[in-house]
Amino acid sequence: MFQIVAFLLILGIDLYAFQSLKSVSANFGESIKILIYILYWLICIGLPLVMIVSFFQYSKIGLMPSWGRISGSLFLSVLITQLIVIVFLLGEDIFRIFYKIFSSLTQSDEAGNVFASRRKFLSQTAIIVASVPFLSFIYGITKGKFNYKVHRTILYLKDLPKAFEGYKIVQISDVHSGSYDDPEGVIKGIDLINEQDADLFVFTGDLVNTKADELDPWLDIFSKIQSKNGKYSILGNHDYGDYFDWQSKEDKLANFNKLLEYQKQIGFQLLLDEHVKITKGDDSINLIGVHNWGKNLDKEVIWIKQS
């Protein structure tokens, strides 16, 4: 039922946005209009189909193909662009409905041409405005995904030991290594981490999307992360492998154990409901790491400890 409702909703959005496209192209030549309409519907129908195929492949092998990720990003970009267009047109259509009711009662329809020209103007404005976020999304999909930013936050803690004043902790999260396909982009991120000259490095979950194998091409690169007082990590929800239909419990446990081993290989000390004491001079602080938790997590996996 959810899939049917989602399909009908997306189809309705496609049809509504299509009316705007028809208004804008009303004065174009017939062959150009046909070409525009064909391209529009190829995009609206083609992207969801490609996504469905990619998700089917993901359910079989546990890895999302790069073309599947690209199609998903493009689909969201087009959908948000359509929604912006619809917001512009919805108010005008509501006004048109009330005007039609008024015209039928007064036997007057003097504003027909005005509505047609206003519709075209609103459609053109909507498409121009919507093109800004659309182009931003395209930039984000291609180049912007490696445009890393460093966010600096100063924490003031009353009971912080004096030796730890000015102590620098670098934290990253949600790497999802199976989504990477550009070594240079990944290396750029690692270099930026090392430029921060961290006293302590922490990684706070989701090293992979589903399978430990996603990390295979990046083991050497991630092992180059530097920190004066160690590199520590915890698990995220994706790291437990709960988003894939495994053939057996043994396969799932083997994947989980492999991910634990990979954490060691890249130099991360994984904290599973554990703590470590970080010492500086005569002072110390405790770093605590707990299991990611939730009602759907497999209890046979979640309580595994590192050997």
Image (tube, helix red, strand yellow):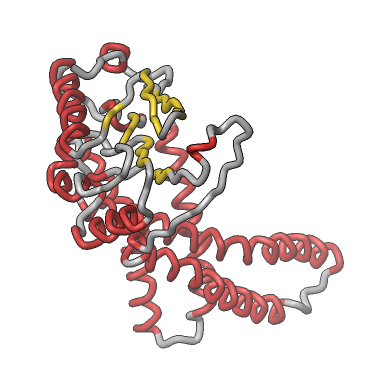
Considering depth in this image, is 48 or 174 the residue closer to the camera? 174
Q: Quadrant of the C terminus?
A: top left
Asked if one can make out residue 53 in the rendered structure from this viewpoint, the answer is no
Q: Judge left or right: residue 65 versus residue 202.
A: left
Q: Quadrant of the N terminus?
A: top left
- Name the residue at 76% across, 77% down: 111
Q: Is residue 18 above or below residue 263?
A: below
- Name the residue at 61% across, 41% down: 156
Instruction: Please state the horizontal and vertical placement of residue 202, each as a whole percent of the image.
Output: 36, 38
Q: Quadrant of residue 91?
A: bottom right
Considering depth in this image, is 101 or 260 the residue closer to the camera? 260
Q: Residue furthest front?
A: 282
Considering depth in this image, is 124 or 97 the residue closer to the camera? 124
Instruction: Please state the horizontal and vertical placement of residue 79, each as a whole percent of the image.
Output: 45, 57
Instruction: Please state the horizontal and vertical placement of residue 139, each as a whole percent of the image.
Output: 38, 68
- Name the residue at 50% across, 86% down: 27
Q: Judge left or right: residue 234 versus residue 152.
A: left
- Name the residue at 46% across, 58% down: 14
Q: Is residue 305 above or below residue 2?
A: above
Q: Is residue 154 above or below residue 34?
A: above
Instruction: Please state the horizontal and vertical placement of residue 172, each as a whole percent of the image.
Output: 38, 45
Asked if one can make out residue 220 in the rendered structure from this viewpoint, the answer is yes
Considering depth in this image, is 302 or 194 the residue closer to the camera? 194
